[in-house]
Amino acid sequence: MLSNNPHIGHKVAGCLLLLSLFLINFSAGSSGKGSQSQDDMYVIHNNQLDLREIVFVIQSQSNSFHVRQAERRRADLLKQAHSLTETPPVVLLLHSLSDNEGDWSILPLLPYLSHSFGKNSSWIVFLEEETNVKMTKLVQVLTKFDTNKEWFLGKPLHDEESTIIHHYAFAENPSIFKYPDFTAAWAVSAPLVVRLADKVRNEPLKSDFTIDLKHEVALYIWDNGNGPHLTAVPELCTEPQDSPQTHHCATTLSTDPPPCGEPVNKEDIFVAVKTCRKFHSERVPVIKKTWEKDAFSLEYYSDHADPSIPTIDLGVPNTERGHCGKTFAILQRFLSSSVPNTKWLLVVDDDTLISLSRLQVLLSCYNPSEPVCLGERYGYGLSQGGYSYITGGGGMVFSREAVVRLLNSGCKCYSNDAPDDMVLGMCFNALGLPVTHSPLFHQARPEDYARDFLAHQVPISFHKHWNIDPIAVFNQWLKDDLRAEAKDGLNKSAKTEL
């Protein structure tokens, strides 16, 4: 205890100041990892926020590749924490928290997070498998905010124009609403988690569909202006971690390539294109002018056999919507002797634009002997025990094992015009087989996504020809002059196949 004598108190304070200056100068004059660790420990121990007050939730998936990626991310977080303190934070893998497959939609998970961590934690920080975190920087950032208040933090995205994937929300001024780029990490304070959890318990979630999770979570938190807006945090970044512009960043994108080996051979992918007679002259020529040449095995399936394309009539009448009967006929044909025996099946619409070379790179991360169903994941009724599915327009990728298990189960369409992607989701859910999400597949056009969201992607697909020049879109977004370019780009950004 310091003496009440002011002269002694001033002397002690002066000694402490000199000691602090000596420590700072010593640290600045040192080099190597040891000095950085000393700096980091100084930051941790001189901030009011304890690492035990942070709960990290890695938005992981149950596919074996993604489990490995998530475990690497957790190990890195715990390694950093161990070098700073003996009391590490909690690091959770989202896919393992419960048997509810819909936990990926976050909102159903809030009651668990509130009950388990609402009282003893200050922050829930969500990150993706490729989000690189610098623990000391993040602690410095979070310490700026009063943890007794409700906070929703992230790197803001906004729409340039109203879009179907956001149900045309804020149509008069789309840019006014901000939502977080999940890849940069995002955080909610404990008081907000507790209140939202009570709301989830007491009020059924209104939307049946989960389409763009980051936007829908932000809408739920905002609650028509009754909840907090997203607070922009410049230190939450999506630049590559080796970029010279990241000195201020608490998060970056990992640039370590995933351990996936060489791209799969094009001979290993069978491509099925769904079309119909009325689009033979309108949409099929676009495919032929863009990505058809990159396919080794490809067939067009229609309600009319046209030898000039050629198309194959599967005996299923055309329907205005759904196309479930046609898709299941494609699955059966894939396992027959009528087509080459390949490891992967890609099913696309005739207005899907896709880079097959980038898909070859992505598929190198997945084991075709496992039941893999891959693409852009949507959800239906997830808060009421619903199911996830791969939305068809962006392209649906199946391993042969997935198709075998599906057809052997006896699951089938309840009508030819049932929504094929949703029926497939129900079938896989009944079998206990998860679908795997990749944000590199897109159900809509480039214009329908936030510019900053696409800026750190090397996309694999887009969908729809409406109000665009599809060939120009393909050339701008999906064309690769060399396969190596696709591989290099995906190694940097597409661990979000994640």
Image: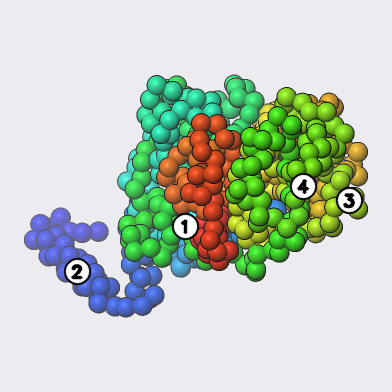
Kind of element beneath mark 1: strand
Q: Quadrant of residue 484?
A: bottom right
Residue in view at x 47 percent, y 57 percent: 253
Of residue 284 and residue 329, the one placed in the foreground of this image is 284
Going by the numbered disc 4, the residue's amino acid type is: Glu
- Locate residue 348, reporting x and y percent: 69, 42
Going by the numbered disc 3, the residue's amino acid type is: Ser
In the displayed structure, does residue 76 sit left or right of residue 22?
right
Which residue is disc 1 drawn over? Answer: 253
Disc 3 or 1, which lies upstream in sequence?
1
Q: Is residue 79 above or below residue 281?
A: below
Kind of element beneath mark 2: helix
Q: Is residue 34 above or below residue 148?
A: below
Distance of mark 1 from mark 2, alpha carbons? 35 Å
Distance of mark 4 from mark 1, alpha carbons? 38 Å
Disc 4 or 3, which lies upstream in sequence?
4
Judged by depth in the image, the label closer to the viewer, 4 or 1, is 4
Disc 4 or 1, which lies upstream in sequence?
1
Which residue is disc 2 drawn over? Answer: 21
Of residue 298 and residue 85, the one placed in the foreground of this image is 298
Q: Can see residue 114?
A: no
Residue in view at x 73 percent, y 58 percent: 296
Distance of mark 2 from mark 3, alpha carbons? 78 Å
- Locate residue 1, reporting x and y percent: 25, 59
Distance of mark 4 from mark 3, alpha carbons? 11 Å
Disc 2 or 4, which lies upstream in sequence?
2
Which residue is disc 3 drawn over? Answer: 338
Q: Can see residue 254?
A: yes
Which residue is disc 4 drawn over? Answer: 299
